[in-house]
Structure formats: structure tokens, C-alpha cells
Image (tube, coloured by chain):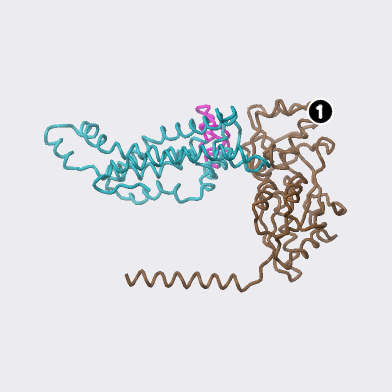
């Protein structure tokens, strides 16, 4: 009995200390970002922290999952989506701070294979992807909801290849999940962004999808109406500044000259 | 009726994956339960811990271990493929393997309790009357432990129906092949305006899980009448 009481008082003291420790520091901005931004945004956050700012907290998932969380009232500060429709969705539901939405990055869609594989694939109308796959699977993000998957499906459809490969598609819940199966050699081919391919030593780019075959890949950023962090707007402006865009260019993104929407 | 053909496919696949998972796990789970209930050997505590590992390990870790072990490049997966032509990754059989492993600890727990509850004096009496060890096992031990075994089966089935983390990590999401109920619900959640589908699939999940829990609880009440044999 006495032991239990002592155990609980210790537990209470631990919780109280943890609570005080978290309450004492100012709240850094929480950034919800598309999975494809993992390395680049972390580098940008480091650069921001090096300027004596609180390092933002970054949460990566597919844009679709993040949009759903924002629509459910997630208390975050910034949102970076890998496509416009999900940002539209969040905007339509009134979760954006007006006038803060800007499309500031672009990307390229590529076909990847495990690093140990050989040969290139010429991506053009009717190219024999199904034959190249054989019994293997095509690893891509979910073509119904995840931006990378939607672009991939649009490309394959425009090239007339989708009907022959759609039954071989493994649908990852984010573009990084799709990349992982190719990295492990479990899928012979995958469709990811050029930036994902560059982030991994275990895959190589075997073909590039023509940008005319899919809607333009743009990354909009916006501050959320629910944002409470003082630093959020500063970090947003840093990301779209020349210095911020240079970091993303380093990771293979195609930085846009920012245009407000 | 209320479900579209696609939704039926999801439900049927879930039932098949869970059914196969539980059927194949049953003999293994019973063997382990018997060993843990009756056996006295060094390293028993280690076996016990290993059996319970999937219960406490993050499911995504279990899925990752399956991926590196049973993938086409994995040490076990590559041999299964070369020797028996058996592929688990990206197949419903892989989903069943993941579900079976996640169900194993719950099944072993339920069965172990009921085996421990068997009155060993009855077995002793049968022995003195000349029954062989094998006959005692089948005519005394198994029948007496049966409610607990069934409770374990139902509980394992319910766990299999709900399996998500290990499954999506190991076999991803392929409609008609690995898209079980929870994976379909997760995927549908990512699509705007899918509330109706999500609601229907979620409702099926609740009904299946609740039904399984009630049956399992009823069975284990009967099994552990004298010992309060709750498995939850």
C-alpha cells in the first residue's frame, strides 16, 4: 500500500516536471507537409534555426491525409500540399489565413527501378510498361487520393498505358511508401517524384514522364487560420524567399517565381 | 443489398484473409499454449515473451520484419519463392501471414488459460483406468479446454479482421488482393466526399468485431467458470 502511494507520487512528480518543461518553452510553429518534402524541408528548418529561430516542428504525410486532419481542426500553423486540389479543399472549408497561399515549388514525375537494375525505359505513348513489369508490381502512391499517384495515373492514362498496368499497381499510402518498395527491390518499377528518386541511393531514375502528360506539379504553401505561433509567418516567408527556394532547388525541386493565387 | 460489389469484395477478402490466418495459426497456437501451460523447461520465459511480442510491438515493426524476412529479396521469402513458387508479398496470403502473427498472442493467451484450468486429477483418473497419454489428451484435455480454444479462435479472428499496420507495411494496398476492411477504410478516408462509404465499411467493422468479442467472452466465461477466465 505504502509502496503504491510512493510509486504514484513519484509518477505525479515526473508528469508535473514534464508538463512544466513543455509549458516553459514558447510554441514553435507546426508545419504539415507533403511526404515528398521530407529532406528538403528539414534542411530548410535547419537553416531557419541557424538564424536563431525556434526550429519548426515538421509533420510529414500524404497531402490527402494532412488535408483531412486540417479539415478536422488540427491545430497546425502551415500547410504545404503536393497538389492544388487538396489546398483548394482546405481553402474551401475556410481553414486558410486569407492571402497567404502561394505556389512556390514544382517537381518532375519519374519512373524508378532498384539501383542494381539495368537499362532505361523510353517513356512515350504506348510504351511497353506492362511487359517490362512481367509478374512484378508497379509501386505508386494511391492513384485515387495521393497527389503523386494522381499525377502518375494521369500520365499513364494520357500515354495509353494505364489499362494494361492498372491491375499491377501497388497503392502506397504516400509517395514515400511507394518509393520504399522499389528501394527494397520488392517492386521492379515505381512512379515517384524526381526529388524522391534523388533522395534515395537504392533507386535510379530509368525514365522521365513528359510534363505534358500530367497536370502541372505545383506545391502550394499557406498559413492556416488556426495558426497561433508567432514564428509561422516568418518561416513561411523564409521558405518562399530566394534563400529558401535555393534549398529546395538543391534537392531537385523546380522553384517557381512565387505567384500569389 | 446495402453494399456495392466493390464493398462486398472488401468484406469477402477480409473474411478470407482472417479465416485462413486463424485456421493456420490454430494448431501452432494450441501447441504453444499447451507447452506454456504444462511444460517445464529452461527458456520457457523466453518462448512466452516471444509469443507475446506481436501484442506489444508496434505493428509497423512487425510489418517491416515481415517485409525484410518474407519479401522476394528476404532470406525466407526468396526461398519460399524459389523452392515452392510461393509469393507472400503483395498477395492476400501475405496479408493472412501478417494477420495470423498478430492474432497468435491473443489465441495463445486464451487457450493457455483454458488448458491451465483443466483439472489434472481427471487426467490422472483416466490414466489409472488404463487410458493412454494420447487418449487422455483427446478425450479429457481437449474437450475440457475446448471453450477456451474456441474463444481464442474467435478473438484471433476479430484481431485479424482489424489488422492494419503490419499489413499495409508488408503487402501495401492492392484492391481485391490485399485491400482488407481497415485498409479500405483508411484509403477511403483520404478521398473527399467518401463519408458514406467510410460509414458503411466502419459499421461492418464494428458489427464483426463486436460480434466476435461477445462470442469470445461468452465462450471464455463457460471455459473458466471456476477461475474467472477472462481473456481480455
Is residue B83 inside the magenta stretch? yes
How packed mark 1 is, by other alpha carbons closer than 10 Å (few <14, some 14-19, many 20 or more), is: some
Q: Residue at x 64, y 37 (%)?
A: A171
- Tell whether A231 sits left or right of B206: right
Chain that is coloured brown in the picture:
A
Tag 1's secondary structure? loop
Magenta-tinted stretch: B68-94
Colour in which chain B is shown? cyan
Q: Residue at x 56, y 73 (%)?
A: A20
Rendering quarter of residue A231: bottom right
Chain containing the residue with disc 1? A
- Tell whether A257 sits left or right of A186: right
Task: Tell me if residue A143 comes above or below residue A196 in the rendering.
Answer: above
Residue B56 picture location, percent across and down: 45, 51
Task: Tell me if residue A9 comes above or below residue A227 in the rendering.
Answer: below
Rendering quarter of residue B5: top right
Report which residue position mark 1 lands on: A125
The residue lying toward the viewer, choosing from B90 and B3, is: B3
Residue A111 picture location, percent across and down: 74, 37
Is residue A137 inside the magenta stretch? no
Amino acid at each position: 500500500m505504502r509502496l503504491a502511494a510512493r510509486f504514484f507520487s513519484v509518477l505525479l512528480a515526473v508528469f508535473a516536471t514534464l508538463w512544466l518543461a513543455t509549458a516553459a518553452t514558447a510554441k514553435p510553429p507546426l508545419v504539415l507537409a507533403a511526404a515528398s518534402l521530407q529532406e528538403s524541408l528539414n534542411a530548410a528548418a535547419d537553416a531557419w534555426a541557424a538564424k536563431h529561430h525556434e526550429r519548426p516542428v515538421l509533420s510529414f504525410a500524404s497531402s490527402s491525409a494532412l488535408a483531412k486532419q486540417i479539415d478536422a481542426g488540427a491545430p497546425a500553423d502551415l500547410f504545404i500540399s503536393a497538389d492544388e486540389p487538396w489546398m483548394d479543399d482546405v481553402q474551401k472549408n475556410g481553414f486558410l489565413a486569407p492571402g497567404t497561399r502561394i505556389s512556390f515549388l514544382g517537381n518532375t514525375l519519374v519512373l524508378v527501378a532498384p539501383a542494381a537494375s539495368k537499362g532505361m525505359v523510353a517513356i512515350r505513348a504506348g510504351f511497353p510498361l506492362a511487359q517490362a513489369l512481367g509478374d512484378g508490381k508497379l509501386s505508386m502512391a494511391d492513384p485515387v487520393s495521393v497527389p503523386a499517384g494522381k499525377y502518375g495515373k494521369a500520365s499513364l492514362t494520357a500515354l495509353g498505358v494505364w489499362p494494361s498496368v492498372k491491375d499491377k499497381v501497388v497503392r502506397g499510402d504516400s509517395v514515400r511508401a511507394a518509393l520504399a518498395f522499389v528501394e527494397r527491390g520488392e517492386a521492379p518499377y515505381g512512379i515517384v517524384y524526381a526529388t524522391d528518386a534523388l533522395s534515395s541511393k537504392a533507386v535510379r531514375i530509368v525514365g522521365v514522364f513528359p510534363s505534358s502528360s500530367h497536370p502541372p506539379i505545383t506545391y502550394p504553401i499557406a498559413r492556416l487560420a488556426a495558426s497561433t505561433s508567432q514564428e509561422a509567418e516568418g518561416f513561411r516567408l523564409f521558405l518562399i524567399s530566394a534563400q529558401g527556394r535555393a534549398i529546395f532547388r538543391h534537392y531537385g525541386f523546380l522553384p517557381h517565381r512565387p505567384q500569389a493565387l | 443489398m446495402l453494399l456495392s460489389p466493390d464493398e462486398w469484395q472488401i468484406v469477402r477478402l477480409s473474411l478470407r484473409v482472417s479465416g485462413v490466418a486463424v485456421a493456420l495459426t490454430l494448431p501452432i497456437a494450441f501447441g504453444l499454449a499447451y507447452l506454456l501451460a504444462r511444460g517445464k523447461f529452461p527458456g520457457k520465459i523466453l518462448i512466452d515473451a516471444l509469443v507475446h511480442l506481436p501484442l506489444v510491438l508496434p505493428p509497423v515493426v512487425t510489418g517491416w520484419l515481415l517485409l525484410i524476412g518474407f519479401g522476394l529479396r528476404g532470406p525466407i521469402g526468396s526461398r519460399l519463392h524459389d523452392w515452392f513458387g510461393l509469393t507472400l508479398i503483395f498477395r492476400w496470403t501475405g496479408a493472412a501471414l501478417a494477420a495470423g502473427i498478430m492474432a497468435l498472442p491473443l489465441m495463445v493467451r486464451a487457450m493457455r488459460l483454458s488448458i491451465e484450468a483443466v483439472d489434472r486429477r481427471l487426467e490422472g483418473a483416466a490414466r489409472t483406468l488404463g487410458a493412454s497419454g494420447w487418449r487422455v489428451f483427446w478425450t479429457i484435455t481437449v474437450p475440457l479446454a475446448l471453450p477456451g480454444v474456441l474463444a481464442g479462435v474467435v478473438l484471433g479472428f476479430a484481431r485479424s479482421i482489424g489488422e492494419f499496420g503490419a499489413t499495409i507495411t508488408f503487402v501495401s494496398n492492392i484492391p481485391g488482393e490485399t485491400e482488407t476492411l481497415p485498409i479500405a477504410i483508411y484509403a477511403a478516408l483520404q478521398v473527399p466526399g467518401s463519408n458514406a462509404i467510410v460509414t458503411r465499411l466502419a459499421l461492418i467493422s464494428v458489427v464483426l468485431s463486436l460480434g466476435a468479442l461477445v462470442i469470445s467472452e461468452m465462450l471464455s466465461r463457460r471455459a473458466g467458470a471456476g477461475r474467472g477466465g477472462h481473456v481480455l
